[in-house]
Image: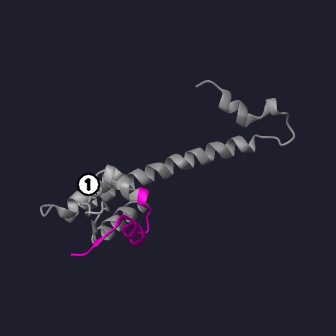
Amino acid sequence: MSSLRTGELAKQAGVNVETLRFYEREGLLAEPPRRASGYREYPTDTVQRIRFIQRAKELGFTLREIKGLLEFRVDPGTTCAEVKEQAAEKVAAVKQKISDLKKIERALNKLMNTCRDTAPIDECPILNHLEEEL
């Protein structure tokens, strides 16, 4: 079986070397064996694993969640229903974030609409709102 050195792996997977080391520290990648020269020797299928991690990150999964998804991949007892449940939880979290962001947008728009461009700074409703005690 062929192997890749760190730089080669990073290039093929489209990440930097520090990302590889970070994934190792986080337990997403196993620490690879070293050649006699001291260079790390990654199995070629590590490229696919890194791409999996990157795609999962793009979908908003945390590293902890990604670790769980990777564990599902190697557990023959896991069903699609379990993975689907994880995805459904992520969708619910995304919907909540969208709702929260819309609230922030409405609040900011309301403050901006009360702002008179020519008013002195001590009458700025945006700054005054931020200084109010909760």
Where, quadrant-wise, is the N terminus in this rendering? bottom left
Which of the image's four quarters has the C terminus?
Answer: top right
Q: Is residue 49 above or below residue 127?
A: below
* Residue 82 makes an appearance in the image: no
22 w.r.t. 46: above or below: above
Task: Please state the extent of the stretch shown in magenta in the rendering.
Answer: 1-18
> At 44% across and 53% down in the image, what residue appears?
95
Give the residue at mark 1. 68
Residue under the image location 28 percent in, 66 percent down: 42
* Location of residue 111 with respect to 69 vertically, above or below: above
- Image coordinates of residue 131 in percent, x first then y, are 67, 28
- Residue at 72% across / 30% down in the picture? 128
Residue 44: image location, x then y, percent: 28, 72
Left or right: where does residue 129 sit relative to residue 117?
left
Q: Amino acid at mark 1?
A: Gly
> Furthest-front residue in view?
37
Name the residue at the left extreme. 77
